[in-house]
Amino acid sequence: MELSNNERCMLKAMRNEPERVWDLSSLLESCGWNDQAHVAGAGGSLAEAGFVNQTENRSKIWRLATEGKAAAENGLLEQRIWDWLSQQEEQVGMKDLQASGIVEKREAGAGIGLLKDLGIQLERGQFVIPSATGAIDATLEMRAQFITQLATSEGIGIVESELDISQIDYFSSRKGIITSSEEVVRTWVLTPQGIAVGEHDLQEHLSIADITPELLQGEEWRTADFKPYDVTRSAPTPQVGKSHPMQALIERIRAIFLEMGFTEIDGDYVTTAGWNMDALFIPQDHPAREMQDTFYLDNPKSIPLPSERTQQWADVHEHGGATGSRGWGGDFSAEISEKGMLRTHTTVNTVSHLEQNPDKPCRVFSIGRVFRKESIDRTHLPEFHQIEGIIMEPGASLPMLVTTLKEFYTKMGYPEVRVRPAYFPYTEPSMEVEVKWRGEWLELGGAGIFRPEVTEPMGVKWPVCAWGMGLERLAMLVLGLDDIRQLYISDLEWLGNQPVL
């Protein structure tokens, strides 16, 4: 085995006392080192080669945490309250404690809980102390002794075996009182093989790990030892900064749509029921309007809308207006249209864009956050993202829509795409879009042609192809996840292992 300079130095020092059990401090002193990493590295290599026997003793060390240090200085919270209670000649209560200055306002609630554990009750705002208080004094004395014992270690800590385990168990359940760390104590002893190493093999030489221009300007490198590299050994994976997978996916989708000639649009989170639902010919008695699906707002509770706009929606909903439709029948409420709410889909963006540009051909998309009152589980969140897009131009048709979606998913890496007939209140014909993943067809969104009941009240000139899909569902597909919640958990190990999208 070719020894390094550190290994030669450590062996040479240990051979001066070959029977000795060497610890970290003695080796640092004998070798003239000030970095324990030198001892750990050299000792591990020598043990692997059989020149020394290395032993490890692991122990848990306990120290005072932030609240524990404050308790060592000012006394435990329960001790301070008990000392105050013991001095009162009359029955006192919670208000008296708060006015005493013994505890801070934030400590009062926790202090009452600690007193109840000691047997002191709070009834109708008054403290009730048991007739026998010896057990309370004994318990508080043990706790104080434990805190004092740790305080005298001056931050170095005390090995668990030297402490009262019952007190460790108790204070571990209280936040910020004590903290622990695991420490390893190593010792080294020479083996016969280490003693037999020749003096010539212990001569230190210049060892070069990095070749630099300054090194090559001299002559020492000609007789130096070059440190060998074992390319077969594992190396640590560098932790580098990168975009969150969701943000990276959004940027990838944005780049694809821009490359396909689309323009990005955006809108506000807060909207009205009119633009979110009425404009899309969703009937006012539709289940999606109920509180279990929609976040309606108290502020603003309502947002005024132009009367001519709500009248246009009313005409279409009640009898179809001039679209040739029979509408939904019943009475339309402008008051319901003006309700303030968080948008439940990003289609409100595209409809608003059409209302502002009814006679300008467009290809636009949006990627935005939407809100629905969903129960959280592996496939649902109350707050998520949608990808929305429309094509409005002469000749816009269903084949154009299908071709566009197939092109998008192909660029995303899913060339097998199919569509199936479906129903949506605001498109006709309507379809669901599916892609093939791991041999199965997965539904990723809906699409269709906006109904005349949607487009004609706004004066839209040409047919409108529209589609929408859930970003999180697509992210689960791209990242191979089976739980949508993983996307929003701050798991640094999982995030570090995600591919660059």
Image: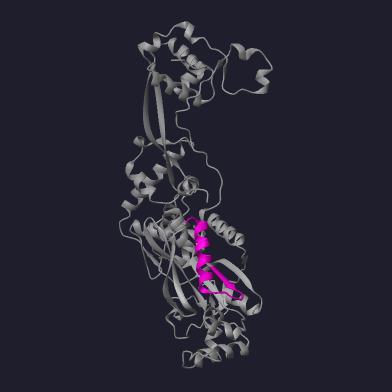
Identify the residue shown where x is 41% and y is 55%. 481
**Closest to the observer: 131 or 180?**
180
Drawn side of residue 54 relative to residue 413, left or right:
left
Q: Position of residue 55 (x, y in %)?
A: 36, 24
**Is residue 292 part of the magenta span, yes or no?**
no
Residue nearest the observer in this picture, 236 or 248? 248
* x 50%, y 63%: residue: 406
Whole-percent x, y for residue 46 in the image: 42, 19
Specify start and end residues of the magenta stretch as a single range. Answer: 388-413
Give the image quarter of residue 207.
top right
Residue 378 seen: no
Direction from residue 160 to residue 264 in the image, left or right = right
**In what quadrant of the picture does the N terminus appear?**
top left
Of 61 and 114, which appears nearest the observer?
61
| Residue 147: percent from left, percent from top | 42, 43
Horizontally, is 310 left or right of 496 in the view?
right
Residue 406 in the magenta stretch? The answer is yes
Residue 444, image x and y in percent?
44, 65
Is residue 146 visible from the viewing direction of this image?
yes
Q: Is residue 268 above or below residue 141?
A: below
Q: Residue at x 58, y 88 (%)?
A: 310
